Image (tube, helix red, strand yellow):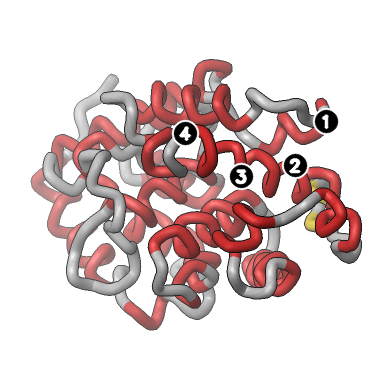
Amino acid sequence: MKKPDYRTLKPFLDEKAELYNRMDFIESDPISIPHKFSKKEDIEIAGFLAATIAWGQRKTIINNANRMMEMMDFEPHHFVLNHQESDLIKLPDFKHRTFNKIDFCHFIRGLKHIYTNHGGLESVFGSHTTLKDSIHHFRQVFFEIDHPSRTGKHVSDPFKGSSSKRLCMYLRWMVRQDKKGVDFGIWRSIDPTILMCPLDVHTGNVGRKIGLLSRKQNDWKAVEELSHHLRTMNPKDPIVYDFALFGLGVFENF
């Protein structure tokens, strides 16, 4: 693996991260959904659901995530904890690409299981020292209860090689702590230094163009390679560069 030119890349990526890590980024991004709330549990549940359907057109993602919040009366934590099966039956039909009402209903059941029996989302994700282990453990706990087989595909597992892009993004939202106002930083049980870069087509393409990624597949090994280089440039806050890579790919067609 060829070592990137960190001396050149770091100031360039610092500048781009500063450009895109700002409040006006929120409105056009799925992170706008948890920003509708102030209660910790509402933020983390809304964020998890929005991140779950974060593939496809961003406008459609935001519209459908808003619809999920509406279906829970814009009180996601209260709805998760207090819903009955009859409430789920009464929910209107829902579909975002391959994620449908069947999946949504199980996600509500799975979240109730986590808050009732495992201390909540932060407790489940925050029980390991690597993000790979945290995501894998979360998936095991989330599917402890009976669930439709089709729903399993909507929670990725890095142990099976998945890049787990949406969960890495969600964990960035919950864990990263700065004063920019985009990421929440409300989970203190996970060290921001162990976060992994959300890897999609845009960040992967930019990473390869600037020499931070040599692996051709967008899988977990690529996540590890890319995150290693980001951590070398900024050990305390490596995933701030997600803003730079994503912004370069989406807004600048880099």
Report, in whole angstroms, how far the alpha carbon at label 3 lies from the one at label 4. 10 Å
At mark 3, the secondary structure is helix
Mark number displayed over residue 118: 4
| Residue at 75% across, 69% down | 71
Residue 196 placement, left or right of 165: left
> Mark 4 or mark 1, which is nearer the start of the sequence?
4
Eye-nearest disc, 4 or 2: 4
Q: Is residue 253 visible?
A: no
> Mark 1 or mark 3, which is nearer the start of the sequence?
3
Mark 1 and mark 2 residues within 8 Å of each other at the beta carbon: yes
* Mark 4 burial class by Cα count in 10 Å: few <14, some 14-19, many 20+: some
Q: Which residue is mark 3?
A: 112
Q: Amino acid at mark 1?
A: Pro
Q: Is residue 28 visible?
A: yes
> Mark 4 or mark 3, which is nearer the start of the sequence?
3
Report, in whole angstroms, how far the alpha carbon at label 4 lies from the one at label 2. 17 Å
Eye-nearest disc, 3 or 2: 3
Report, in whole angstroms, how far the alpha carbon at label 1 lies from the one at label 4. 21 Å
Eye-nearest disc, 3 or 1: 3
Residue 242 placement (x, y as % from top left): 35, 53
Residue 245 placement, left or right of 144: left
Where is residue 254, by image quadrant?
bottom left
* Mark 2 burial class by Cα count in 10 Å: few <14, some 14-19, many 20+: many
Mark number displayed over residue 106: 2
Where is residue 57, by image quadrant?
bottom right
Q: Which residue is mark 1?
A: 148
Report, in whole angstroms, how far the alpha carbon at label 1 lies from the one at label 2. 8 Å
> Mark 2 or mark 3, which is nearer the start of the sequence?
2
Q: Amino acid at mark 2?
A: His
Please, is residue 61 above or below residue 198 in the view? below
Q: Residue furthest left?
A: 7
